[in-house]
Image: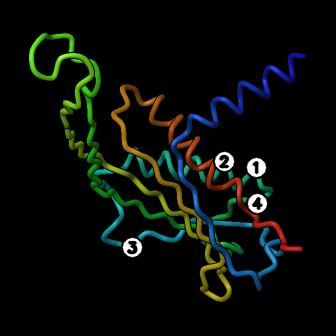
Amino acid sequence: MKKLVLAIAVLALSACSTLKTNTDFDPAVSFDQYKTFTWVAAKEEDKGYHLDGLLDQRVRDAVDSQMAAKGLTKVAADADLLVNYLTKVDKKINVDTFNNNFGYNPYYGPGWGWSGSMHTQTTVREYEVGTLIIDLIDNKTGKLVWRGSVEDTIRDQNTPQERVEIINNAIGHVMSAYPPKAEK
């Protein structure tokens, strides 16, 4: 019974998720051959301090953890796979129009009783959608073999722990599709 309740709770929580994931891969590649990974080396001008240093470390830690869970070993050099990620933020606009006050009019005079009066209200909301793209490149050929992306509405998070949890959750969702399953 406990397992059933836990399964229902997990499904209910996952149904509330707004994460949108997408993956693509080279179907000619045998992903069983990959045993090690390393990150794409940073360019000389990228080394040192940069504005998104905390985000960078959180993403790398989450990807490292997911890759290790998949049985891949992180090495310093000569890895089978090179890992890289990209981020982008898009501004979106949501326009909603509501029709209200249609129906019963309680006042005497013209239009008394059921009336056809209708009022329209339009609200416009601007929001940001963040996308994280993870690339896996075959180190021998230099070709992209797998790409996963995860997209979600950006919300302000209050604590570093909440930010870590959101990044871990997002990367866990997208990396759940690696390695790709063979089509039958």
Q: Quadrant of residue 2?
A: top right
105 w.r.t. 178: above or below: above
| Residue 69: assigned label | 1
Q: CA distance from mark 1 to mark 3?
A: 28 Å
Residue at which label 2 appears = 65
Q: Position of residue 28 (x, y in %)?
A: 77, 85
Helix, strand or loop at mark 3: loop
Mark 2 touches mark 3? (CB < 8 Å): no
Q: Earlier in the sequence, mark 4 or mark 2?
A: 2
Report, in whole angstroms, how far the alpha carbon at label 4 lies from the one at label 2. Answer: 10 Å
- Could you say which disc has been placed on residue 43 in the image? 3
Name the side, left or right, on which 21 lies relative to 79: left
Q: Tags 2 and 1 in contact by the CB under 8 Å rule? A: yes
Q: Identify residue type, mark 4.
A: Leu
Q: Residues within 10 Å of mark 4 (few under 14, many from 20)?
A: some
Q: Residue at x 45, y 35 (%)?
A: 163
For badge 2, the amino acid type reads: Ser
Of labels 3 and 4, the one closer to you: 4
Ranked by sequence position, the earlier of labels 1 and 3 is: 3
- 102 w.r.t. 140: above or below: above
In the picture, measured across the screen, residue 31 lies left or right of residue 61, that is: right
Q: Quadrant of residue 12?
A: top right
- Tell me the residue at 61%/85% (across/down): 143
Q: Amino acid at mark 1?
A: Ala
Q: Quadrant of the C terminus?
A: bottom right
Q: Which residue is the site of mark 4?
A: 72
Which one is closest to the eye, mark 2 or mark 3? Answer: 2
With 68 as the anchor, is 82 left or right in this view?
A: left
Between discs 2 and 3, the one toward the N terminus = 3
CA gap between label 1 and label 4 equals: 7 Å
